[in-house]
Image (cartoon, grey):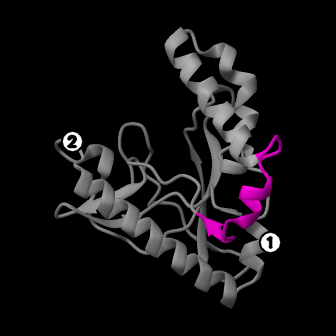
Amino acid sequence: LGGPSCPDITTSAPVPATDGEPVSVHPLPVVSEAHSPCRLVVRLLTWVEGVTMSDFPGTQSQEDLADAGQYLGNLRRRMDELAERRPETVTAATRYHAWDGQNTLDLSGFVDCIDDEGRRAMVLEVLDAFRAAFGENGKGEVAASLPRGILQGDFNDANIIVRDGKVAGEIAFGDCVHR
């Protein structure tokens, strides 16, 4: 890892985490200038050669997006297996997270920050549809009928690793939640 916006973190000596696996603590840039750099824990699970989908040349086709969706589905099944083998992962992922879909209505407080009236109207429409489908607290009858499991909460083109035109890996598991 490294580059102009991310300092080289390969030089930090790893230390054992509570489960004995090595982790490193690094001051890394974050979005909030007031909190940047922020000391973050980094653990390399498996190195996957490739580039992020957002850096992949050209636009993503429907096939690319379908490949990413299939990868996400397989990842979800693997997370279910992990939760069965190590129930403490469910406890760790059961927490409030702003990006958790059940907290969608929390975005209502930010709608006034959208200057473009068309975009603001679109966001309000989505929030109204969410409220109608999932209830005021995001935990209505429809939500209760959905399967539960650990979800990767930040699956986007900047966190998807592509090699030879196919999804080869995923990064950024810090936003996982159990829902």
Q: Is residue 149 magenta?
A: yes
Query: Which residue is rendered at x = 73% and y = 27% of the image?
Result: 108
Q: Amino acid at mark 2?
A: Thr
Residue type at mark 1 is: Thr
| Residue 99 position within the rendered picture, expressed as x and y whole percent measured from the top left | 65, 45
Quadrant containing the C terminus is bottom right
Q: Residues within 10 Å of mark 2 (few under 14, many from 20)?
A: few
Q: 91 or 27: nearer the eye?
A: 91
Question: Which mark is in front, 1 or 2?
Answer: 2
In this figure, which residue is indicated by the disc labeled 2? 59
Task: From the viewer's perspective, tell me whether residue 104 is left or right of residue 27.
Answer: right
Position of residue 98 measured from the top left corner of the image (x, y, whole percent): 71, 43
SS category of the residue bearing label 1: helix
Question: Which x, y percent locates residue 19?
Answer: 70, 82
Residue name at image x 54 percent, y 9 percent: 117
> Which quarter of the image is occupied by the N terminus?
bottom left
Pinpoint residue 43: horizontal percent, then vertical percent.
Answer: 55, 67
For the record, the magenta segment spans 135-151
Disc 1 crowd, CA 10 A, few/some/many (<14, 14-19, 20+): few
Image check: 178 left or right of 23?
A: right
Disc 1/disc 2 C-alpha distance (Å): 38 Å
- Where is residue 25, by image quadrant? bottom right
Residue 35 lies in quadrant? top right
Query: Can see residue 138?
Result: yes
Of pointers 1 and 2, the one earlier in the residue sequence = 2
Which residue is labeled 1 in the image? 91
**Can you see residue 100?**
no
Is 171 displayed left or right of 95 in the figure?
A: left
